[in-house]
């Protein structure tokens, strides 16, 4: 996985680093893509997506858009189970995931801590090893967390004969596993450096986040001959406004409050698939959701106590 990329900032301008991260992710995605076609949900716009439009494609954010929670944290749980790190690290992952689930938005400090931890954890490990583990972790923690509504939107583009890409700050190899399991075309993700198939602990560019996502989509669109004005993009986060603004058909999916406000101002389409809470009350978790997260964290602590 040339992708657990969460290195400390390099001495380049933010724009240059974003472009490098985007181009690296686009190159990695194009190297391992599979074309699969599926089905449609046209919603309020029966003529979209347009069937047979080969210059159109769809780009989906992953965390809280396609899947509940953060892929990075689920990946961390899987690595803990395989003894890549200790219980203290797991508790930190659990807290970060609980915060992310309840707040519904990304905390830059939490995300940076997770990236730094991931880099140190995988450094020296083989890319092939992490790819194989990623397959197992998808089955264990991620498969049941896919939003059916968002999945149906992706199916619509596939059925229309369009390519569908995940675009995420998660490691590109993990993103590629998820994309393949969902029958999507491929994935753009954070690219971590590897030499002779072994992770160095360094990042290529920067995490594929915010502006870097937009650069990755732009680079991939150029390589694939796509017309971005005919493409669609889907995300839950205001951090992805640069990516959403690139395309002719932006969608706010399970949006955080800032994205919801922006989407309404721009007349973008909104869809909310979260159960137990009304779309107008983003960020206020249902009692069941709070209980589930609290219970999960308590279970982790209980396991730790039993092992003492």
Image: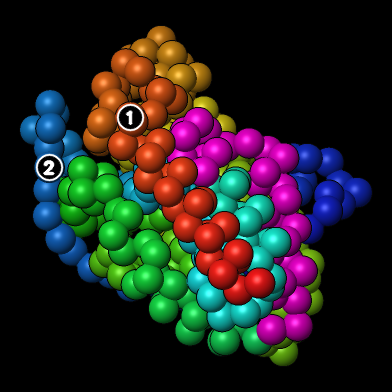
Q: Residue at x 53, y 60 (%)?
A: 302
**Residue 70 circle label:** none
- Residue visible at 44% across and 68% down? 176
**Circle 1: element type:** loop
Is there any visible trace of residue 25 in the rendered image?
no
Residue 88 drawn at (x, y percent): 70, 61
- The residue carrying pointer 2 sits among few (fewer than 14), some (14 to 19) or many (20 or more) residues within 10 Å by Cα, namely some
Colour setting: rainbow
Residue ID at (72%, 48%)? 112
Span of residues in magenta: 98-125
Q: Which residue is mark 2?
A: 41
Residue that carries the numbered disc 1 in the rendered image: 286
In front: 63, or 227? 63
Query: How packed is label 1: few (under 14 Cα within 10 Å), some, or many (20 or more)?
Result: some
Side (left or right) of 97 relative to 281: right
* Circle 2 SS class: loop
Q: Main secondary structure of the magenta part?
A: helix
Comes first in the chain, label 2 or label 1: 2
Asked whether 290 or 308 is in front, the reply is 308
Q: How many marks?
A: 2
In the picture, residue 196 is in which quadrant?
bottom right
Q: Quadrant of residue 214?
A: top right
Residue 86 position by quadrant:
bottom right
Tell me what residue is drawn at x 54 percent, y 75 percent. Answer: 81
**Percent coordinates x, y for residue 23 in the rendering:** 62, 57
**Residue 291 visible in this rendered orientation of the protein:** yes
Q: Which residue is farthest right?
A: 11
* Extreme residue in the bottom direction: 196
Percent x, y of residue 90: 62, 61
Q: In the rendered view of the protein, which quadrant contains the N terminus?
A: bottom right
């Amino acid at each position: 996985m040339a992708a657990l990329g969460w290195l400390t900032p390099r001495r380049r301008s933010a724009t240059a680093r974003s472009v490098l991260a985007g181009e690296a992710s686009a190159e990695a995605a194009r190297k391992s893509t599979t074309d699969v076609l599926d089905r449609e949900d046209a919603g309020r716009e029966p003529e979209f997506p347009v069937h047979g439009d080969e210059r159109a494609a769809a780009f989906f954010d992953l965390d809280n858009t396609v899947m509940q929670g953060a892929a990075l944290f689920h990946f961390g749980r899987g690595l803990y189970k395989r003894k890549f790190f200790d219980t203290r690290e797991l508790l930190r992952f659990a807290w970060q995931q609980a915060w992310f689930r309840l707040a519904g938005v990304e905390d830059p400090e939490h995300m940076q801590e997770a990236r730094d931890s991931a880099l140190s954890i995988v450094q020296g490990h083989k890319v092939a090893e992490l790819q194989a583990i990623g397959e197992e972790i998808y089955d264990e923690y991620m498969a049941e967390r896919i939003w059916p509504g968002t999945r149906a939107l992706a199916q619509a583009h596939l059925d229309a004969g369009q390519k569908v890409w995940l675009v995420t700050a998660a490691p590109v190899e993990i993103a590629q596993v998820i994309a393949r399991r969902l029958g999507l075309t491929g994935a753009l993700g954070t690219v971590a450096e590897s030499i002779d198939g072994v992770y160095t602990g360094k990042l290529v560019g920067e995490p594929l986040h915010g502006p870097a996502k937009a650069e990755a989509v732009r680079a991939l669109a150029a390589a694939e001959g796509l017309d971005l004005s005919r493409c669609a993009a889907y995300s839950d986060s205001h951090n992805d406004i640069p990516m959403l603004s690139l395309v002719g058909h932006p969608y706010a999916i399970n949006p955080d409050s800032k994205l919801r406000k922006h989407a309404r101002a721009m007349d973008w389409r909104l869809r909310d698939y979260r159960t137990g809470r009304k779309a107008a009350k983003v960020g206020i978790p249902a009692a069941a959701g709070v209980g589930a997260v609290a219970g999960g964290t308590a279970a982790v602590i209980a396991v730790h106590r039993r092992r003492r």
